[in-house]
Image (cartoon, rainbow, N blue to C red):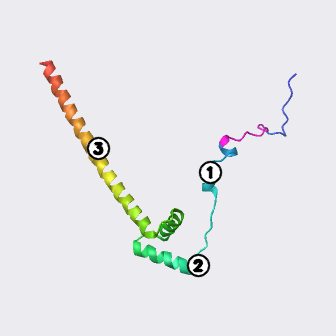
Amino acid sequence: MLRKPNPKTKRHARPRRKSARQSNPSPETEFRKSVLKVRLDAFQIAALKRLAKEHGTTLAQEFDNAIDGYLLGMNQDEIRLLNTYLDRLNKSMDQNIKALDAARRKTKKTRTHSTRKQRSGQRR
């Protein structure tokens, strides 16, 4: 004989298993969840604002540069030089991609044209 379900219990009363991601979070996930508070005095904030104004960046970018420099053991000039090289590299890559796209389009157009010529020659 079948038992009647107990209306007081929920349908999914069993605890669900945690996925591997929930039970063993990766270091990247842990980093994203963590919060770091940094307290700067008025002099440090003023210095960062001055640097941001001089370099045409934001306070947050200057702060990031300062942290990167500290962690990498580099001074601000070296970080700016690396950022300049990175910007130039990105521009150069964009130009190369545009040139390759144009060459690909030209090649495709030429191949299509030659294929049409071959087909028209075979029909005659």
N-terminal of the pair, mark 1 or mark 2, is 1
Q: For residue 109, what is the image quadrant? A: top left
Q: Position of residue 121 (x, y in %)?
A: 13, 22
Q: Amino acid at mark 2?
A: Asp
Against 45, residue 100 (above or below) is above
CA distance separating discs 1 and 3? 39 Å
Numbered disc in front, either 1 or 3? 1
Horizontal relation, residue 86 to residue 107: left or right: right
* Farthest residue, direction bottom: 43
Please provide percent x and percent y for residue 57. Answer: 43, 69
| Circle nearer the N terminus (1, 3) | 1
Of residues 58 and 89, the one drawn nearer to the viewer in this rendering: 89
> Quadrant of the image for the C terminus?
top left
Residue 18 magenta-drawn? yes
| Residue at image mark 1 | 27
Residue found at the far left of this picture: 124
Q: Is residue 54 above or below residue 26?
A: below
Residue 39: % across, % down: 61, 73
- The residue drawn where x is 35% and y is 55% is 89
Task: Judge whether 80 appears above or below 118 on screen.
Answer: below
Read off the residue under disc 2: 41
> Could you classify mark 3 by the number of other residues whose Cα lies within 10 Å: few (under 14), some (14-19), or many (20 or more)?
few
Question: How far is the residue under mark 1 from the one under mark 2?
Answer: 31 Å
Relative to 45, residue 18 above or below:
above
Which mark is on residue 101?
3
Left-right relation of 122 to 22: left
Q: What is the chief secondary structure element of the magenta stretch?
A: loop
Q: Please tell me whether mark 2 or mark 3 is closer to you in this view.
A: 2
Of 47 and 109, nearer the camera is 47
Identity of the amino acid at label 1? Pro
